[in-house]
Amino acid sequence: MTKQSLQLKIAQQLAITPQLQQAIHFLQLSTQELCQEIQVLLEKNPLLEIDDDFNEISVDSLPESDNIDTSKMMENREISSDISLDVSLDDMYSAGSPSGTFSDYCDEELLVYQGETHQTLNEYLMWQLNLTPFSEQDKAIAISLIQSIDDKGYLTSTTQDILEEQGNDEIELDEIEAVLKRIQHFDPIGIGARTLQECLMLQVNQLFPITVEIKYAKTIINDHLELLGQKDFKALQKKLNVDLQSLKLAINIIQQLQPYPGYSVNTVIPQYIIPDVSVKKIAEKWSVFINSDPIPRLKINQHYAAMEKVANKTDSQYIHQALQEANWLIKSIENRNDTLAKVCQFIVKHQQSFFNHGEEYMKPMILSDVANAISMHESTVSRITTSKYLQCPRGVFELKYFFSSHVNTKSGGEASSTAIRALIRKWIEQENYQKPLSDNKIANLLEAQGIIVARRTIAKYRESLSIPASSQRKILK
């Protein structure tokens, strides 16, 4: 029979307090997200305020009463009762950035986006529908058709489906087709097509005057679209029985058509990036500046803080908790900015060649390289580089962009996969489009520079750059 016993063990365990969770959370927020988070906390905590020309009231000017009414101050505010200030997230340190603010060293002034209106494709087509004379029956059919057009501009339902949707035995399929043809001549031309072939034909039929090259283009779209997709120009020339120059002109006409007409209508609200860090060369040295301008500068509301000494026990406890939370928030924001500065300073120092010469000179770098150099945990580095952007003379880059794996070289050194991608893109941009570089040829070019990369790896890098295979890059000259 098993004997049961009770044992006492002593063990250390890290307790994740709400304050530590908040500090960790702040690390992975972008500048824009941090500003939104601060706004929420400002509304919840009366001890927090934006650092402006607020007139602080001294303790001596407060009434000597134990019954201060804090009902308004406590309204709609939830303060955690589990407050502790004895936990820190890595050691606090100074970033050591040069004097001056982010905006002092930006090439352009950051403008506040005021917003604009955006019309969806569906709304744009409905607007045209309301300007077009339709009978009530045809208008109902047209509405059903428009509602079945996707963002690319293609009809996603069959005309038979639309017919059944009407629920009217008097309507025939020919009438659905007739209404569809009218919609297909709405702007943008080609809208409501069911296939790529139909979409392109709708557009090429609008070209005028009709030249011999346009006729060839129609023949290619009608009968040889697959050969065009394969870029089998010899087969196309043979099928059409035309000279090379006429074939080239016909293909140029097709290439100017829009395969996704719906995309010509702006349906996507642009996302504006506010860089979190600016890097600029000053006195032959690359310097890092944290973009703290958009982040509200916070301070403690001394008026409410002073009430802690004269309030009753319940109110005093609430103010004390709110004060601790406010202090921790300010400290967490400072820690976030200092950590960001320290990580970015290492990145800039390690990637000097990139900032001086471009991405072909990017060095391999992983999270542990940064973590070891600045004595932080990899998870901290990962969080602080998440959703953050760096602005420099070469453009705006996500911090994750500067991290890449390495490839061994013949000399025993290492090359960055980012640099290899840059070389691949450069060589392809400079290639003879009549004889595009194959993946094997690119591998040979890299090997000539001492970088050994397998053909399948080249293919993977090429695909990550959205560059098609050599057979798809061939252009008729």
Image (cartoon, rainbow, N blue to C red):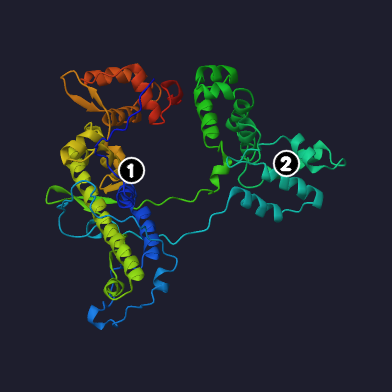
Tell me if I can see residue 432 in this picture: no
Q: Is residue 389 above or below residue 78?
A: above
Q: Secondary structure at mark 2?
A: helix
Which disc is residue 386 wearing? Answer: 1
On screen, residue 108 versus residue 127, left or right, reads left
The location of residue 362, given as percent across then percent down, is 23, 34
Type of residue at label 2? Leu
Task: Name the foreground residue: 424 vs 287.
Answer: 287
Compared to 132, does 435 lie above or below? above
Q: Position of residue 271 (x, y in %)?
A: 43, 50
**Quadrant the C terminus occupies:** top left
* Residue identifier under label 2: 180
Counting the numbered discs, the total is 2
> Mark 1 falls on what kind of element?
loop
How far apart marks 1 and 2 lie (CA) works out to 47 Å
How far across and how far down the image is residue 307, in percent?
A: 30, 74
Instruction: Examine the rendering and report whether any part of residue 307 can be seen.
Output: yes
